């Protein structure tokens, strides 16, 4: 058996019908949510970054009002509309058959790339939870390596009439994250931070994302059941609002009981040394990337994560894309700094 972080924590058995079952205790519902009000997860001032941080740490989600203008949302929709599709083979999984998507949305919508992915607020929030700086012993000295963030995925969802509820899940399962139960948030456990932007109004009736508040503090096998259903909230937003969500927070799309489409774009950032969920590079002409600045190329995973992760012949991919700016992209010896070690008795 390969190494596991979770298989040994439960003990499935074969039932009389030949199917596999497992007994897991119900997750008790926190009493603190009895007095919860919707305003507790809403930040009206998008410049109030500190409140966004603290809300995410406490609840695992945070709605921010007026992230984009209505006009910017319309432009994004115009760019994306020709690209919605669904695979017939999906048949309800991973999405209901009434849902269509635009994968790799940044390749189809330059407005999304500029105004969502490279948005300073999204970059600040993702960096706060995901960026790392560590010391490494090399030879006789210590060197510092910095890891920033990169886009993990960017998918736009059009949830149509009669679409059913999606199943609750944690987005960070793609990185095989396992979580221990915690009383308070601990930095370093997250591998993903997401933003969902409402390109249309999202309501409980038209398929707004549901989230289990504070489920980022739950253990690996603390899933959704009726005993913790009072943690469930519909993340209702006006067009142009956004919601930030940690990769460890349980969430799911909801049923659309209206005749209108619900459209949202979901972008997740991850650590720059982890594999991206969506492959943005294969099949994309090099010319597409040559027109982008250093900040955007880094966010798309086209710069090395110190010390050497993601290099091409020990060079940053940026040197291949824009060879004339080599000095701008190079990091001396692939580390941020060197520290001289003086051994003490």
Image (cartoon, rainbow, N blue to C red):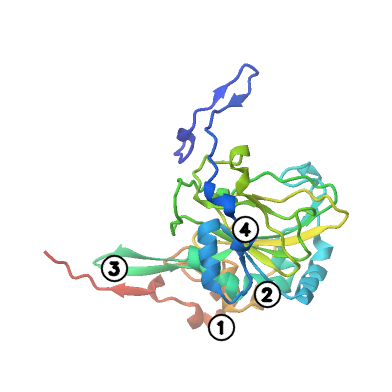
Q: CA distance from mark 2 to mark 3?
A: 39 Å
Point out the frontmost of discs 1 and 2: 2
Point out the frontmost of discs 1 and 3: 3
Q: CA distance from mark 1 to mark 2?
A: 27 Å
SS state under label 2 = helix
144 or 261, which is in the foreground? 261
Q: Decide: marks 1, 2 in contact (CB < 8 A)?
A: no
Q: CA distance from mark 4 to mark 1?
A: 54 Å
In primary-sequence order, the first of circles 1 and 3 is: 3
Which residue is the extreme one toward the left? 345
SS state under label 1 = helix
Q: Write down the residue under mark 3.
A: 142
Q: CA distance from mark 3 to mark 4?
A: 49 Å
In primary-sequence order, the first of circles 4 and 2 is: 4
Quarter where residue 61 is shown: bottom right
Horizontally, residue 146 falls left or right of residue 87, namely: left
Which residue is the extreme one toward the right? 259
In primary-sequence order, the first of circles 4 and 1 is: 4
Q: Residue at x 53, y 47 (%)?
A: 31
Q: Residue at x 26, y 65 (%)?
A: 139
Q: CA distance from mark 4 to mark 2?
A: 30 Å
Q: Write down the residue under mark 4.
A: 37
Q: Write down the residue under mark 2.
A: 115
Instruction: Assess disc 4: are there few (<14), some (14-19) or many (≥20) residues with their C-alpha within 10 Å of its C-alpha.
Output: few
Point out the frontmost of discs 4 and 1: 4
Provide residue 219's location: percent of width, then percent of height.
49, 44
Provide residue 326's location: percent of width, then percent of height.
51, 80
């Amino acid at each position: 058996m390969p190494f596991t972080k979770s298989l040994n924590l439960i003990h499935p058995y074969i039932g009389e019908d030949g199917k596999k079952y497992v007994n897991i205790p119900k997750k008790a519902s926190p009493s603190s949510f009895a007095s919860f009000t919707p305003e507790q997860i809403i930040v009206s001032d998008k410049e109030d970054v500190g409140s966004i941080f603290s809300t995410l740490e406490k609840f695992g989600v945070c709605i921010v009002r007026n992230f984009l203008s209505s006009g910017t949302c319309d432009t994004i929709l115009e760019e994306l509309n020709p690209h919605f599709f669904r695979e017939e083979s999906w048949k309800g999984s991973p999405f209901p058959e009434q849902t269509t998507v635009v994968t790799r949305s940044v390749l189809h919508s330059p407005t999304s790339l500029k105004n969502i992915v490279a948005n300073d607020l999204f970059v600040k929030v993702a960096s706060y939870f995901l960026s790392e700086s560590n010391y490494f012993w090399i030879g006789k000295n210590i060197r510092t390596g910095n890891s920033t963030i990169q886009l993990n995925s960017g998918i736009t969802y059009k949830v149509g009439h009669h679409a059913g509820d999606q199943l609750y899940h944690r987005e960070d399962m793609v990185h095989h994250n396992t979580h221990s139960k915690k009383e308070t948030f601990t930095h370093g456990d997250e591998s993903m931070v997401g933003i969902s932007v409402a390109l249309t109004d999202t309501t409980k009736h038209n398929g707004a994302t549901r989230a289990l508040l504070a489920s980022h503090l739950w253990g690996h096998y603390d899933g959704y059941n009726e005993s913790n259903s009072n943690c469930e909230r519909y993340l209702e937003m006006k067009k142009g609002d956004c919601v930030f969500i940690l990769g460890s927070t349980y969430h799911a799309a909801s049923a659309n009981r209206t005749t209108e489409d619900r459209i949202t774009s979901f972008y997740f950032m991850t650590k720059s040394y982890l594999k991206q969920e969506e492959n943005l590079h294969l099949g994309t002409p090099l010319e597409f990337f040559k027109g982008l600045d250093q900040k955007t190329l880094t966010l798309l995973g086209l710069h090395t994560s110190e010390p050497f992760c993601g290099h091409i012949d020990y060079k940053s991919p940026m040197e291949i894309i824009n060879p004339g700016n080599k000095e701008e992209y190079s990091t001396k010896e692939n580390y941020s700094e060197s520290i001289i070690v003086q051994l003490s008795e």
